[in-house]
Amino acid sequence: MRWIRCVRPALRLLAAMTVLAALAACAGRPTRTGGDLPPLRLSPASLQGTLALQQQLHFRFGRVERDLDALLEADDAQVQLLVQAMGQTGFRVRWDGQHLDEQRAPWLPRQVRAERVLDDLQFALWPTAAIAAVLPAEWTVTDDGEHRRLQHAGQEALHLQRHADGSLQLDNLREGYSLTIRSVDGAAAPAQETPP
C-alpha cells in the first residue's frame, strides 16, 4: 500500500473525534444541538487512492483534553482504522462499503460509535465531490482549499481547517468537540482542492 502523505494529518482528526465523543458522553454534558449529522458511508473506492497513515491526535471537549494514536489503511476494497490510548487498543473498525465491522475494548464507552468515526474520517479525507453527492436536501459541503465546511440550511455543523504546518483541526459544532491531527513523521500539508 503506498503512502499518501498529503492526507496523513486527517487520520488523527478522525480518531480524536471519536474519543472526544466518548469523553463528552462520560462527562455527562450533552452539547448536541440541531440534530444529528447526516451519515456519509462513502465507498472505499470513492477515496480514489490508498492510505497508510500513523497519526497523533489531540482532542478537546470543554475542559477535557486527551491524546490518542491512530493507524489507518484504505484502498479500493476497504478502510481499516485502529485507535489506541496510552498503548491500549480502544477499537478497530473495518468498512468495505457495505458492512461496518467493529472490535472494541470493554472499557470503551458505548457512546463512541464506529459510524461517527467513519463519517468523520470520510469528511476529512474523501474528495468534496464524493461527500456532496450523498448529502440529503438542505445539507451542503464547501471547500476553498484551506477550510472545508458542512452546513445545514446555512448553519455550519462541521469545520475542517488545514494548517500550513500540515496539521488539521476538525471542529464538530453540533457535538461540541475539536480535534487536532499531526502526522507522526511531519508529512506535508494535505492536498488542497481548487475552489470551483
Image (cartoon, rainbow, N blue to C red):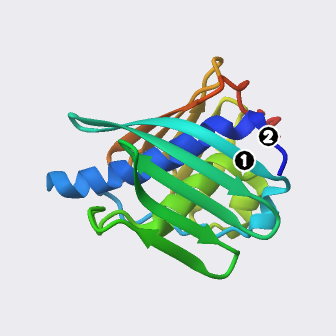
Above or below: residue 7 compared with residue 158: above
Q: Quadrant of residue 112?
A: bottom left
- Is residue 121 found left or right of 102 in the rendered image? right
Q: Mark 2 is on which residue type?
A: Ile
Q: Mark 1 is on which residue type?
A: Ala
Q: Is residue 137 visible?
A: no
Q: What whole-number distance in Å separates the C-alpha atoms at marks 2 and 1?
A: 7 Å
In the structure shown, which secondary structural element does the residue marked by tag 2 occupy?
Answer: loop
Above or below: residue 177 compared with residue 101: above
In the structure shown, which secondary structural element does the residue marked by tag 1 occupy?
Answer: strand
Residue 102: horizontal and vertical position, in percent? 49, 73
Q: Quadrant of residue 192?
A: top right
Query: What's the mark number on residue 52?
Result: 1
Residue 16: horizontal and vertical position, in percent? 44, 45
> Residue at coordinates 73% horizontally, 58% vertically from top-left?
74
> Residue at coordinates 19% horizontally, 56% vertically from top-left?
26
